[in-house]
Amino acid sequence: MNIELSALEERAEAEENMAEALRLLNAAIRRVHRSGLLVQAEILTMHSPGGSVPQVNLGTLDRQHGAI
């Protein structure tokens, strides 16, 4: 029972961490956009023995001159 509770707590903490990370990411994207840059986002799939895992790749583009 203790192991189950520990796993549930770990999942809940992971969800909270993901939500906070997304809030920070969205705030950063808004700030970059206000500064005159565009945000380029790409979802990559990383393959490992444990299965495939999505990974987000972010970059910025100057609205007038292209890639930075």
Image: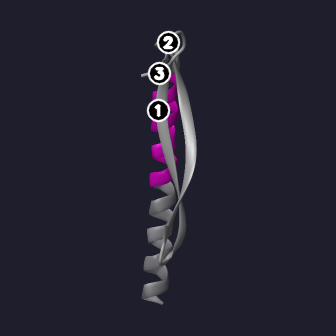
The extreme bottom residue here reads 1
Q: Is residue 7 above or below residue 25?
A: below
How many dots with numbers? 3
Residue 34 at x, y percent in the picture: 51, 14
Q: Nearer the viewer, mark 2 or mark 1?
A: 2
Residue 12 at x, y percent in the picture: 50, 64
Residue shown at the point (45%, 29%) measured from the top left:
28
Q: CA distance from mark 2 to mark 3?
A: 15 Å
Q: Earlier in the sequence, mark 2 or mark 1?
A: 1
Determine if the magenta segment contains residue 66: no
Q: Earlier in the sequence, mark 2 or mark 3?
A: 3
Q: Which mark is residue 59?
A: 1
Q: Nearer the viewer, mark 1 or mark 3?
A: 1
Amino acid at pointer 3: Val
Residue at which label 2 appears: 65
Q: Magenta region's main secondary structure?
A: helix
Q: Are marks 2 and 1 in contact (CB under 8 Å)?
A: no
- Which of these two is toward me, 26 or 52? 52
Q: Secondary structure at mark 1?
A: strand
Q: CA distance from mark 2 to mark 1?
A: 14 Å
Q: Which mark is residue 33?
A: none
Please state the extent of the stretch shown in magenta in the rendering: 17-31
Residue at which label 3 appears: 32
Q: Secondary structure at mark 2?
A: loop
Amino acid at pointer 1: Gly
